[in-house]
């Protein structure tokens, strides 16, 4: 008995309001095993209390608690399964082969509560966490760092690129949309944090919302990109970031931001194939 | 309510018959007896997980001893063996077939990808406990043999009640021969799988076949129990047995009626339906009010999703995520656990 796609989507979009989400760990920890759960420790601007507190209350009462991180056993199966994704995609086959090579049974994949979506989550989490070890040229500008980090994250999709579109279709299933959007928001937050964005002002939200949307669009662009080294994807990304920077100056009030954000969320969902 | 009272007066109640001795209600619960006994226990097996025929347990809302409960549950299922589907329909608004389909599909028995080189697939052995009339076991075979094209999957259907098993065996004659060949029926109490008897084809009384054998430890890939576990006298003992017979990496999976507490309005409606209407309908349809009353009460007594998940973990399983999945707002739930590798 699922709520209709639209209200779910609205719920998902409102997650972008609440970036202290999902599976973030302090960036200093190593990314080899994902076992701890902490909330974002980034500064969050104390904006107009109405918007901020409404968003948080909504988050607390309506959303299921953030999905738990993976246990050591789940990590063992998933990391082994992930090595099969380039060949077998995000599929039950990859999971079973992974369980086998981790010394478990074919049936053991039942441990993973979301089956194939667990494998997708593993992909998203692992590559987000790997971003923290991306070397950054210290002298470059904030925008250049954002672009560099975002493109690094996009490149991590390359080995599984033929299977990315089907992964996006699974992520856009109604029951997975909130988790998928939350992870997207956390990715944007992570990129801005690693790039050294310390601004605590109304653009805090705008930047994260627009980076989420840009990332999703670039990812989709990339699935059809055959240029060497994904040159075209990089150019696409750079154009979108440039546009957003211009827009960033214009969108200042919270009201404008809410409208923009809702539209961005809906567009992300549409680009994933959600029927809205 | 008036109708209930009238019916009670008009029809001789099963509860007053001598075979079902009434025991005064006591407030001791499974969890309380668990807490009380675990402190005094020094061995690795908690006391509460060792079957004790004289220990108090629940029969619906009555407190009886574990031995009496086994007898009385047998009575209930013998009397509803042929009509129990109707009861499942009533309790689930007809959803139980969909739940069973989902349960079996999500477990995906027999799924075993081939790789290049020698066939890497190992035979799978599925044990369906409280398998009654074969509803789950037959679905398992269909998924494994037909949908997943893996004939190397065997299913053992087990139940404490030979009458239920006999109905199942009868129904299995409609299956393809290859599936029938992969099926076996054994009589066993889920709390002690060291004493199982093959279902005898000539008689339904257990005394005629005195040879018992044990389901070996570490021999089962998938242990399932659907709409059965709430009837067990000692659930921790059954979970321990499940853990024993499963291979490392093997999966425990349970489908059971559960709690809709998360939806207060629905909860109220569902309770008045189940406590008010179902025993009455049971009386009218099956002529057996008390058995239906018991079934409703046993559902109400069953622990919450979270509490049952914790019992599964206590028995040594690992769970992923919440450890359970609600179906139809929690009218039923699926719990899964995996026996870890040592
Ligand atoms: C409602 S039926 C469920 C049948 C079937 N699994 C299904 O889903 O339709 C419950 C079954 O549990 C069995 N049962 C009750 N106590 C048991 C025990 N201690 N050990 C094994 N089976 C038991 C009953 O005999 C009955 O067949």
Image (cartoon, helix red, strand yellow):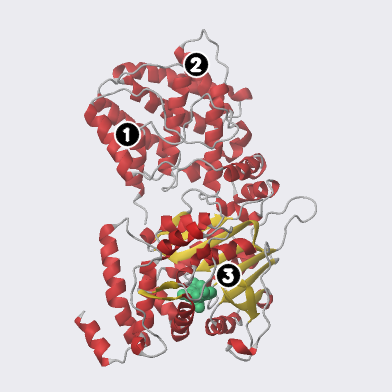
- Which of the two discs, 1 and 3, sits closer to the camera? 3
Q: CA distance from mark 1 to mark 3?
A: 49 Å
Q: CA distance from mark 3 to mark 2?
A: 57 Å
Q: Which mark is residue B128?
A: 3
When asked about the image quadrant of residue B175, the answer is bottom right
Q: Nearer the viewer, residue A72 or B101?
A: A72
Q: Which mark is residue B288?
A: none
Q: Nearer the viewer, residue B109 or A8?
A: B109
Chain of the residue that carries numbered disc 2 in the rendered image: A
Q: Which mark is residue A262?
A: 1
**Left of A270 or right of it: where is A157?**
right
**Left of A188 or right of it: where is B287?**
left
Question: How many other residues sit within 10 Å of disc 2, few (<14), some (14-19) or many (≥20)?
Answer: many
- Residue A164, image x and y in percent? 55, 38
Q: Secondary structure at mark 1?
A: helix
Residue pointed to by mark 2: A145
Q: Nearer the viewer, residue B140 or B192?
A: B192
**On the rendered image, what quadrant is the N terminus of chain A found in?**
bottom left
């Amino acid at each position: 008995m699922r709520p209709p796609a639209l209200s779910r989507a609205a719920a998902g979009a409102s997650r972008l309001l609440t970036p202290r989400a999902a599976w973030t760990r302090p960036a200093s920890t190593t990314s080899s095993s994902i076992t701890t759960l902490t909330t974002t420790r980034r500064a969050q601007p104390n904006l107009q209390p109405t918007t901020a507190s409404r968003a948080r209350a909504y988050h607390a009462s309506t959303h299921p608690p953030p999905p738990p991180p993976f246990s050591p056993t789940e990590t063992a199966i998933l990391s082994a399964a992930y090595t099969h994704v380039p060949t077998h995609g995000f599929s039950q086959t990859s999971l079973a082969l992974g369980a086998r090579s981790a010394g478990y049974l074919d049936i053991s994949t039942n441990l993973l509560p979301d089956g194939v979506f667990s494998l997708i989550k593993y992909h998203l989490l692992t590559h987000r966490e790997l971003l923290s070890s991306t070397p950054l040229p210290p002298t470059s500008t904030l925008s250049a760092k954002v672009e560099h980090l975002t493109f690094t994250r996009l490149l991590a999709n390359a080995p599984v690129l033929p299977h990315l579109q089907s992964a996006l279709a699974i992520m856009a299933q109604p029951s997975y949309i909130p988790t998928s959007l939350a992870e997207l928001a956390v990715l944007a937050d992570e990129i801005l944090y690693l790039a050294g964005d310390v601004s605590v002002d109304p653009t805090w939200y705008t930047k994260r919302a627009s980076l989420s949307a840009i990332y999703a669009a670039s990812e989709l662009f990339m699935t059809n990109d055959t240029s060497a080294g994904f040159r075209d994807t990089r150019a696409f990304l750079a154009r979108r970031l440039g546009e957003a920077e211009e827009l960033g100056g214009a969108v200042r009030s919270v009201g404008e931001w809410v409208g923009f954000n809702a539209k961005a969320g809906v567009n992300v969902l549409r680009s994933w194939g959600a029927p809205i | 309510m008036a109708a209930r009272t009238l019916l009670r007066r008009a029809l001789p109640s099963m509860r007053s018959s001598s075979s079902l001795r009434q025991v005064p209600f006591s407030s001791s619960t499974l969890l309380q007896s668990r807490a009380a006994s675990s402190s005094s226990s020094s061995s690795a097996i908690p006391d509460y997980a060792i079957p004790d025929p004289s220990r108090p347990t629940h029969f619906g809302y009555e407190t009886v001893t574990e031995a009496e409960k086994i007898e009385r549950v047998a009575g209930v299922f013998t009397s509803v063996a042929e009509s129990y589907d109707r009861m499942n329909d009533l309790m689930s608004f007809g959803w139980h077939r969909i739940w069973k389909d989902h349960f079996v599909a999500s477990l995906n028995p027999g799924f075993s990808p081939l790789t290049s080189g020698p066939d890497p697939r190992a035979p799978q052995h599925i044990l369906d406990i409280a398998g009654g009339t074969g509803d789950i076991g037959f679905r398992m075979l269909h998924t494994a043999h037909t949908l997943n094209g893996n004939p190397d999957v065997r299913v053992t259907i087990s139940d404490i009640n030979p009458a239920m098993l006999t109905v199942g065996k009868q129904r299995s004659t409609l299956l393809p021969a290859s599936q029938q060949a992969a099926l076996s029926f054994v009589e066993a109490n889920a709390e002690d799988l060291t004493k199982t008897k093959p279902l005898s084809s000539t008689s339904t009384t257990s005394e005629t076949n005195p040879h018992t054998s044990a389901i070996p430890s570490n021999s089962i890939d998938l242990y399932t129990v659907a709409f059965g576990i709430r009837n067990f006298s000692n659930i921790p003992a059954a979970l321990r047995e499940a853990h024993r017979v499963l291979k490392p990496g093997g999966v425990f999976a349970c489908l059971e009626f559960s709690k809709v507490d998360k939806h207060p309005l629905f909860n109220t409606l569902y309770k008045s339906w189940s406590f008010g209407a179902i025993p009455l309908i049971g009386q009218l349809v099956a002529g057996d009010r008390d058995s239906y009353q018991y079934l409703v009460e046993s559902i109400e007594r069953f622990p919450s999703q979270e509490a049952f998940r914790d019992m599964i973990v206590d028995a040594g399983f690992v769970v992923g995520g919440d450890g359970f999945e609600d179906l139809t707002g929690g009218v039923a739930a699926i719990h899964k656990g995996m026996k870890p590798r040592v």
